[in-house]
Image (cartoon, grey):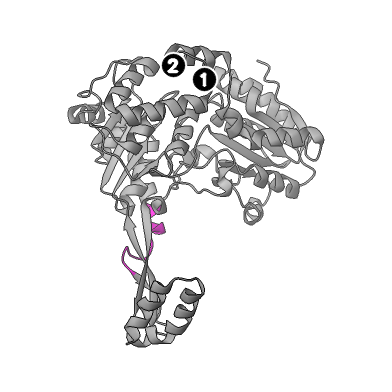
Amino acid sequence: MRLGIPVLHTGTAAAAKALRRLASRLSALENLDSAGLRARTRRIFGKALRPDQVVARIVAHVRSRGDSALLAYAKLIDGVSLTRATLRVKDPEMRAAYRRTPALLRKALELSVARIAEYQRRLLPAGLAPEAAKAGPAGVRSGLLWTPLRRVGLYVPAGTAPLFSSVPMLAVPAQVAGVKDIAVATPCRRDGKVDEGILCACQMLGLKEVYKLGGAQAIAALAFGTRTIAAVDKICGPGNLFVMLAKRAVFGHVDVDMLAGPSEVLIIADDSAAADCIAADLLSQAEHDALASCVLVSTSRRVAEKVLEELERQCLQLPRRQTAAAALREWGLVLIAPNLDEAVRTANLLAPEHLEIMVRNPRRLVPKLNAAGAIFVGPHAPEALGDYVAGPSHALPTGGTARAFSGVSVYTFLRRTSVIEADAPGLAELAEPTMVLAEAEGLEAHRRSVACRLR
């Protein structure tokens, strides 16, 4: 299996071009125009459409027609026949799935839940109550009121693979934050059944509102609501390209956690790194999705060449080798850097979802890395550890959006409200500058609202 991954030197025109392509990956994907996509959209919509056009149609249709649109798209896109009565997973299905889940898997999920909860509790603000700052000499006190969101929607991917690990990664931070009302949307199979691992995780966490919905239609339903599904205040969770574009389309009507599309990893390596482990870690992202991005930046040409050999060998052994090979061919890249400073500069430019540091003294690079969803430090911290049991959520920003967005945590599910209190001496002390500013802006009622209290 020849993967044909380009090997380039940083600082060259070819490397700059390859990096620009990766940096603009989200734009390239939303305008994707492949023969397969054209054929499929022509069958569903009667004409060939780009991904962004597909999402715009689905979101508008679900918003205007609600449940009927959801059921129509379930049939057209997923090939499953659902009714309003079967759209929601019944409690007996949840309990049965939990009982049938192998004990070893349940134990692993319980460990994941415990470690995520312990990590998220450490992040909580000091009490979800007003935090007043010390009163200044003016007698005006300011603080924050932290309150959990009322209702959130969680999207759990199950298209290319059922990611039941996403259930605790999303739901546990929400529960630790204090969210009481949680709806889960996840794709079902053609037989109308949801993966039992996903249902087991939901049952374990007491999540009773689970809908058989995938893709852009699920995001639209959570955002705008239907007769069957109540609208949420925020939507969280990773997904494919269409899910990511749908989250962007509904942002403003509801909040979203981030733009988490196809997965990606960037590995910084020197001549001490193990080539077989680097290849395994690159493939762990490539097997997710044919659109996944896998980048190695190494200061060692020898290590890079060994990694390429390992990728060829290991890819052949994977059950999902066709998906992994497609990702590596289209979005794989190996860069040779003259030094670690240049490798860090490249990583900060791409702002990857997952960033692994496989070098001597890896900790010294951490303060220099300012844009990544999650950083994995040293040879014993594979990205897979973060996917399942390390503690932090694996729901992370992709496509360079880690420059501005952060991964899911308790903060994702908390609102901050300013709390301001003043006594009479405090108002008197600050009245004059307040009225001067109001008058300068031409807002007379503002000035009078202060003046009346002085009398």
192 is higher (above) or lower (below) than 400: above
Q: In which quarter of the image is residue 238?
A: top left
Q: Specify whether residue 126 is painted magenta.
A: yes
In-front residue for pair 83/448: 448
Q: In this view, does 137 lie to the left or right of 206?
A: right
Reply above or below: 342 against 239.
below
Residue type, numbered disc 2: Phe
- Relative side of 253 to 34, left or right: left
Q: Quadrant of residue 147?
A: bottom left
Q: Which mark is residue 427?
A: none
Residue 189 at x, y percent in the picture: 34, 19
Bounds of the magenta segment? 118-130
- Residue 200 lies, in percent from the top left, at 28, 32
Query: Measuring 42% from the left and 24% from the top, which residue is drawn there?
Result: 159
According to the image, label 2 marks what residue?
Answer: 45
Residue 101 in view here: no
- Number of marks in the rendered image: 2
Residue at image coords 56%, 26%: 291
Quadrant of the snapshot with the N terminus: top right
Q: Which numbered tag is attached to residue 49?
A: 1
Query: For the residue marked with disc 1, what is the amino acid?
Result: Leu
